Amino acid sequence: MVDVSVQSATPDPSVGDLLAAWLPTQRWYPGAGEVSVEPWLAVTFGPDGEVDGGGDVATGPASDGGAVPTAEPHLVLLLVRLTGPALPGGELVAQVPLVLSDVEHVGLGHIGTVSTDAGDVAVHDGGAHPTGWVTLLHAMGVPGDLDTLTERARVLAGEQSNTSVILPAVPSPGGTGAMLKILRTVADGPHPDVVVPEALTADGWDGVPRFLGALEVDAGDAEPVHLAILSELVPNAEDGFELACDLASRDESFAPDAAALGRLLAELHLRLARVLPAGPPLDAAAFVAGLRRRAERAVAEAPDALAGRADEIVALLDELEARLAGLSAPVPTQHVHGDLHLGQTLAGDGTWKVLDFEGEPQRPVAERTAPDLPLRDVAGMLRSFDYAAAVGGAHEPERWRTDAAAAFLEAYRAASPLPPGLDDDTAEVVLRALVLDKALYEVVYESRHRPAWLPIPLAAVDRALDPTG
């Protein structure tokens, strides 16, 4: 295992200027609006297991005091604090892995070349560079040389919040290779995408990609942080949303797959309740108050679309509050996925797997990882069917969506009993309210970014408000 050194981040000003221009262009960059960027920590990796010392983010270690940058590419993980009113909780820590080399070793992910007191330095995106991948693998205890471990490796296209690298040649128990996820937004303490898959893998459940390891570093006075996750590669896997869209485009039913997903989700919830600590009883007043706050914010941010529906939204949440207040027994909460949709699933070799347990990225960490009602995940998947029907271009999108939703709900309900204290009628209102919550968020997003898609979530809002309409 490679030794790791954590030190205060003091990047050369030329590197800082380069990153200031590059970071906002990256899909994973969480900044929005006015964002302040402050370097926090630099994590460096020593050659042959030695701890890197001295030097700085631009040049790395140098035995002569940093006069000449090291020739061979090496990895530095820069952690930067982002602060701004549009960020979840007002503050995030972003991970910026950098591979640094002399100008003779320019490679994949080249960001630019800077001139420093130590000489010219080529700066690369470590998430796109083989040296970055292999250094992280070595730090997690995976043996092997660069050429072997990175054979047929490629960065997964399209991912927005993290960087995932497919590594077919990395040893794994099933012999299928591995997937390396480089977390771009990190948080103090155990990461849910480590804690949950590790617990489910230890429990012997094959409904998640097998957990193989993670990189954790001590951040000094703060809690340790996770920076990367390694899991077994799912062979012949297809993204669940892409599969659903493909079927919709050919007017083929997704109902059999939706039923399989219903059974998978039911099993996930039963396993999570078993392997992770139970949550507190549902605080009904706080639960409904949270839904009201998000609904009020959505109406304020998309008034043209939602102002005329505001009274009906209030009425549904009033009904939910009254029903929950009238329950005779407390309703338990538990760990859930938290951001479930078709894009968080994989179909491979006739089986389905669920992945990405980080929760909704636009909510503060403490909020998105808190125990919740399992119906939150059910609502998320139902909303995903709606988008698959529309994006896939189903000839009859409403029928396609309805068939998938019915098959999913029937399978889920058959395999997962209602939480104690929750009756069928109340559960139906809870599910409508959670679907509404998700659809209102989508209305705001579409009104800002894709106005042509606004009818998709608006139709869901109307269905939630009047299911008989």
Image (spheres, grey):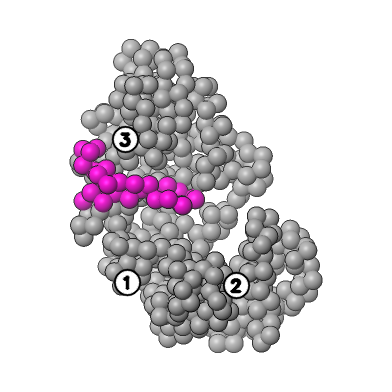
Residue 447 visible here = yes
- Give the quadrant of the C terminus: bottom right
Q: Residue at x 50, y 59 (%)?
A: 359
Q: Which residue is mark 3?
A: 131
Q: Amino acid at mark 1?
A: Thr
Task: Return the residue at label 2.
Answer: 434
Local crowd size for mark 3, using a 10 Å CA cut-off: few (<14), some (14–19), many (≥20): many
Q: Residues within 10 Å of mark 1 (few under 14, many from 20)?
A: some
Disc 3 and disc 1: Cα gap in Å?
34 Å
**Label 2: few (<14), some (14–19) or many (≥20) C-alpha neighbours in 10 Å:** many
Residue 328 lies, in percent from the top left, at: 59, 85
In the image, what residue occupies the spot 38% across and 55% down? 194
Which badge, 2 or 1, is on the more N-terminal residue?
Answer: 1
* Tag 3 and tag 1, C-beta contact below 8 Å: no
Image spot of residue 70 (x, y percent): 33, 21
Asked if marks 3 and 2 touch (Cβ < 8 Å), the reply is no
Residue range of the region highlighted in magenta in the rendering? 145-171
Q: Is residue 160 magenta?
A: yes
